Image (tube, grey):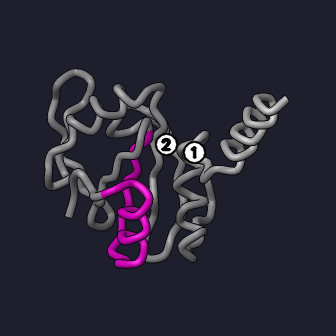
Amino acid sequence: MRRALLVMAVMLLAGCGGGGKSSPEAGVVSGLGDRGITARGGGHAPPGVLSLASTMYRVPGGELHLFRFPSEQRARQAASLVEPDGYMVTNDTGVNQIVDWVAPPHWFRAGREIAIYLGSSADVIGALEAIAGPQFAGA
């Protein structure tokens, strides 16, 4: 009986945990919301520089593109194709593409997701750093 209660208590506490990121995209968007930043839209954009469709949101001072990869390893590989300045990306065939972004790019990777914030709001950049860690490329 005592063991069963202990197992139930552990399961209850595990279920009440911080949650992690069962859905990486929802994690970033809800993480922004938790920090007072509203992400509007959620429309799908066709495959682009990372050869994968993204979901685009309007956020203060710009837009956010979220790419969800099938695995964290694949997201790491895609991140390695982005030059440190965030303007040059190597495509699937090994060709370097220079992208003329609409605003300064800020690249973040969290798990199997890559987020590009095209804008200059310090609040949005700070929130993304809190959610995903420091940007791996960009302005």
Q: Amino acid at mark 2?
A: Ser
Q: Nearer the viewer, residue 48 or 60?
A: 60
Residue 43 visible from this viewpoint:
no
Say which residue appears at 32% left-offset and 39% top-offset. Answer: 49
Residue 54 tag number: 2
| Residue ID for mark 1 | 44
- Tell how many labels: 2
Q: Position of residue 33 (x, y in %)?
A: 60, 68
26 within the magenta span: no
- Residue extent of the magenta highlight: 113-133
Q: Quadrant of the N terminus?
A: top right
| Label 2 vs 1, first from the N-terminus | 1
Q: Position of residue 77 (x, y in %)?
A: 27, 29
Asked whether the residues under the numbered discs 2 and 1 touch, taking CB atoms below 8 Å apart as contact, a structural biologist would say: yes
Crowdedness near tag 1: few (<14), some (14–19) or many (≥20) residues, C-alpha within 10 Å? few
Q: Position of residue 31 (x, y in %)?
A: 55, 61
Say which residue appears at 36% left-offset and 63% top-offset. Answer: 129
Say which residue appears at 39% left-offset and 44% top-offset. Answer: 114
Q: Quadrant of the C terminus?
A: bottom left
115 within the magenta span: yes
